[in-house]
Amino acid sequence: MRSSFILRASLCCSRPQYKAKLPTMKEMVEQQMEVQQKAMGKVAIYPHHVMTRSVLECSAELIKSGTFVSSLLELRKTAADLRCISFSAPKAHWDAAVLLVKSNPDQAEFEVWVNPQVPGYDDRNSAAAMYGMWENCISCGAVHAWVLRPQRITCKGLDEFGKEKCEVLDGMRARCFMHELDHIKGKTIIQRALDPEFVVSGISMSQKDLWPANFPSAEAYVTPPLHFFDYVTNQVVVPKGMEWWCGQEASPSSQHFHNQRINQ
Ligand SMILES: [Zn+2]
């Protein structure tokens, strides 16, 4: 848009015409990789000390301060540069209970939660319906962990202006919210995994056909990346918000298990 404006302006002035050189696909990819690499340098990697302890709640005074506004702006930019669907303050070395989340990867803006809470979240005796998923994390290297989380949650907290909000979340939005909530509490997917067998490398995720049958569990074995295993209906499902992305999977190994059901 900007280059066409410059070209039109030069025509009006009867100056020599210069065709704007559009970047090639290779240049655009290189540019994007450079942006991501630069943003990656700002990310705290587990077990960095900010990733291993609860962060501070934000006071009403802090939320109104210029420091908060500029830190939030920086957090948003880092998350956008990294093309994350969710992000949280500890990942950017910010000691504050702030998380960002989108409902799907194509949503333009992040929603902001300050001092987020999920009542009953740590209740290990809860009978809530659960999804299992292979999660990964920008702060945990190439690790993937099988993590069980409630299918729907009620979230309480503040928006970026300090106004109270309470919402019921489901699908990928709920999953990402809980992932970031764990970071705020000093936990990662490694601590959330059921057992050490439920933590594997990224490379091994693309070699699932070489795993022992039903490793590390029948549910985890049949569930491809980006999908949920629904423990109520006993089948693999596409998470709400990930419909397009799951449809674009190109890896044959990740398609071996689509729509497989257990015990049916
Ligand atoms: Zn994470």
Image (cartoon, rainbow, N blue to C red):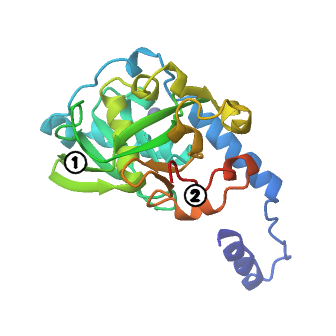
Confirm if mark 1 falls within 8 A of ligand 1.
no
> Pointer 2: what residue?
259
> Pointer 1: what residue?
155
Residue 62 is at least partly visible in this image: yes
Amino acid under disc 1: Cys
Query: Residue most toward the front?
Result: 264
Residue 141 is at least partly visible in this image: no
Number of the front mark, 2 or 1? 2
Q: Secondary structure at mark 1?
A: strand
How many marks can you see?
Answer: 2
For the point 67% across and 56% down, which residue is it? 249
* Residue situated in front as seen by the camera: 219 or 49: 219
Residue 63 in the image: x percent, y percent? 21, 40
Q: Secondary structure at mark 2?
A: loop
Residue 222 in the image: x percent, y percent? 58, 44
Residue 91 in the image: x percent, y percent? 44, 30
For the point 79% across and 65% down, which residue is it? 22
CA–CA distance in space, label 2 to label 1? 31 Å
